[in-house]
Image (tube, rainbow, N blue to C red):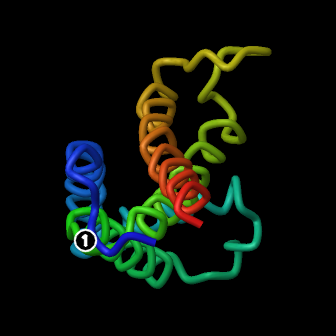
Amino acid sequence: MRLFARPHQLPGRLAAGAVILNSGLGKARADEKTATELHAMAKGTYPFLENMDPVRFTRLLSKVEIALGTALLVPFVPGLLAGAGLSAFAGGLLGLYLRTPGMREEHTLRPTEQGTALAKDVWLLGIGLGLVVEELGACRRSG
């Protein structure tokens, strides 16, 4: 596993990292109303979050986003690790898109106006999987 990001990986990592870090920093200052709204949307898709306190959930989500955003921005975090984290995070966001009523046109994957913001997170999954696939291919070639 390489210890530094390859130069061509940096644009995708920087773009995704900046967006995610900014989101995490914004959630760190979330008020109780915002926390309740975020939690309500999340627990509708992921029922295991039902009993978690909304403020605690939002603080935890904020910390995860800050850590992931930072890992993507710091070039010495290996691409496989950064890509795996980004892929998992993006998969959770896309789960919200796929499972939340009103996000998609009926019987299609096409987003409604309300779902467009979540549907756009597919680019995060693409960047994450690209990093993972590249690093696994590099390991196979060198091993």
Tell me where residue 80 appears, x and y as whole percent: 48, 64
- Residue located at (27% from left, 69% from top): 4
- Residue located at (68% from left, 36% from top): 98
Residue ranking furthest to the right: 107
Front-most of 35 and 107? 107
Q: Amino acid at mark 1?
A: Thr
**Total count of labels:** 1
96 sits to left or right of 114: right
Q: Which of the 4 quarters of the picture holds residue 30?
A: bottom left
Q: Residues within 10 Å of mark 1 (few under 14, many from 20)?
A: some
Front-most of 104 and 5? 5
Front-most of 28 and 131? 131
- Residue located at (46% from left, 19% from top): 113
Tell me where residue 18 appears, x and y as whole percent: 20, 55
Q: Which of the 4 quarters of the picture holds residue 58?
A: bottom left
Q: Is residue 49 visible?
A: yes
Residue ranking furthest to the front: 142
Q: Is residue 40 visible?
A: no
Is the C terminus in the top left, top right, bottom left or bottom right quadrant?
bottom right
- Residue located at (28% from left, 44% from top): 12
140 sits to left or right of 4: right
From this view, report whether residue 14 is shown above or below residue 117.
Answer: below
Of helix, strand and loop, which one carries label 1? helix
From this view, report whether residue 52 is shown above or below residue 87.
Answer: below
Tell me where residue 70 appears, x and y as whole percent: 25, 71
105 sits to left or right of 29: right
Q: Which residue is mark 1?
A: 70
From this view, report whether residue 81 is shown above or below residue 129.
Answer: below
From this view, report whether residue 42 is shown above or below residue 76.
Answer: above
